[in-house]
Amino acid sequence: MYCLSPGVRARKEGFGLLFYSSKDAKMTFVKSGGLLRIDPGPRGERLLALSGEAGAEGKVVRLLDVLSRKGLIVELRSDQ
Amino acid sequence: MCFREKALLLSYDLTNRYTLTAPVNVTWEITSRCNLRCRHCLSADLMDACHRELDFEESRRFIDSLDRMEVFQVNFGGGEPFLREDFLDILDYAHEKQITTCVSTNGTMVDEALASRLAGMDYMYIQVSLDGAAADANDAIRGKGTFERVISGIEALNRHGFPNLSINTVVMRSNFREILRIYELGRTYGAKTRLSRFRPSGNARRVWEEYRLDRSQLEELSQFLSAHKDVLTGDSFFSITARDRRELGLNMCGAAKMTCSVAPDGTVYPCAFLQDPRFRAGNILDESLESIWQSAAPFEALRSVKIASCEECGRFSLCHGGCPAVAYFLTQSLDRPDPECLAPSPGGSLARDSLGGATDHVRTV
């Protein structure tokens, strides 16, 4: 499970998700279509939800990898 | 960026194809009051015409609406924002909603107490205006004694460890030779340099011929920016951006696509430089910003501007025709090329040298 990194916000747009980092005031446009969405978590955190669309697993993995490397999302440990 | 990554991320050019659900950032001129009378002030006409400003409750409601729309950032300007007695409360409320803020200030009101308060705020940026590296050049534009007061404000912010400070300079003929020294002065305070374009709106329309850069100065400025990649330009200089700065800033006008501007009385415009009756898109006291953003005629007009004479130019991917505000105020037309374009002709030599690729990032401060 992933959530937005501290200081990062994201919203749904027609092409997918638009990320914004408060740390450097940069935007990232992500062509994720309907594969990813942002859901509220139980403690106010913003969780990244996966659509589970059949056949798109590879693209979702690549998206998560890119977003993680850019510091926009972090993986939650199982005890979090 | 590798090919695989590029396939997943998009360039902000796509805002030509998609209308975003909301602005990414909103410029909010929160007051028309100012304690300076700068010769180039873009808001000078506004100060004469706009006597009402949103009160605190109206401001809170507006921030609530920005939060609902998921606007990420508000750039506060004016007038001088710190003249508002409730401005720190407005900043606090925006931060409560996790909206990043950037304040453009003339810096003259920043004392120890204010600097201390600002240093305690997260995700906040401050741009202090300075138009010369010494008193003579700066004060000729901004008024006698302002240089010393601005430096005093910057030093107070420094002493309290304010982290996200930049010095903003409007580049004009009178201070063109000062840019490097302003840059070096900023470094001594740990402040970034942000160069803004001198554009013919407000007072600047009246002193345009006196202060505008000529072509050779624009070319020199382009080279300076290439040599100093850490200098910020906001959305000012895409008309002269060389290929090697392509990934550092916008390559197109963001007005009505990524941003819009709200005047002190709540009137909405596509951009702070397009505050002209023709571009009045509505007022947030009468209708929601969301509705204005989605359907106001001036916004639709800007989104559909096509500068046909630029589309064959080699620089098109770098500027998309440049700044519509400059074109409008100098030619009375939105669909004319930016009059300060550096390409000698469509596809000219400078244009061919400046071809660039796409980028996925752009700073909003």
Image (cartoon, rainbow, N blue to C red):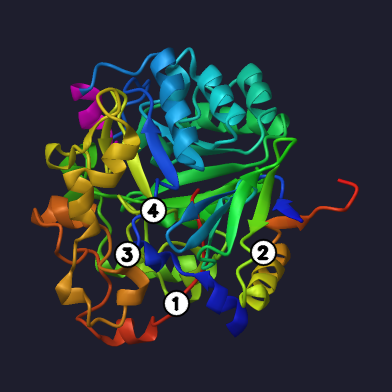
Q: What residue is at 33 percent from the left and 49 percent from the top? A: B174
Q: CA distance from mark 3 to mark 4?
A: 10 Å
The three-letter amino acid code for the residue at tag 2 is Leu
Instruction: Name the main secondary structure of what is drawn in magenta.
Output: helix
What separation in Å lies between label 4 and label 2 (alpha carbons)? 21 Å
Location of mark 1 (residue) = B243
Report the Cα–Cα distance between label 2 and label 3: 24 Å
Q: The N terminus of chain A is located in which quarter?
A: bottom right
Q: Are marks 3 and 4 on the same chain?
A: yes
Indicate the secondary structure of the residue bearing disc 4: loop
User: For numbered disc 2, what is the local secondary structure?
Assistant: helix
Between circles 2 and 1, the one closer to the viewer is 2
**Do labels 2 and 3 touch, CB within 8 Å?**
no
Residue B275: % across, % down: 22, 38
- Name the disc covering residue B194, or none: none
User: Do discs 2 and 1 belong to a common subunit?
Assistant: no
Residue B230: percent from left, percent from top? 58, 60
Which residue type carries mark 3?
A: Asn
Res B296 quadrant in image:
top left
Visible residue check, residue B164: yes
Decide which of tag 3 and tag 1 comes sooner along the chain. Answer: 3
Circle 4 residue:
B20
Which mark, by number, is residue A67? 2
Can you tell which of label 1 and label 4 is closer to the viewer? 4
At label 1, the amino acid type is Arg
Per the rendered image, the range of residues in magenta is: B41-49
Numbered disc 1: secondary structure = helix
* Residue B42 among magenta residues: yes
Quickly name the residue at label 3: B16
Of label 1 and label 4, which has the lower sequence position?
4
The residues tagged by marks 1 and 4 sit, at their Cα atoms, a distance apart of 27 Å
Q: Kindly give the residue lying farthest to the front in the view shown.
A: A54
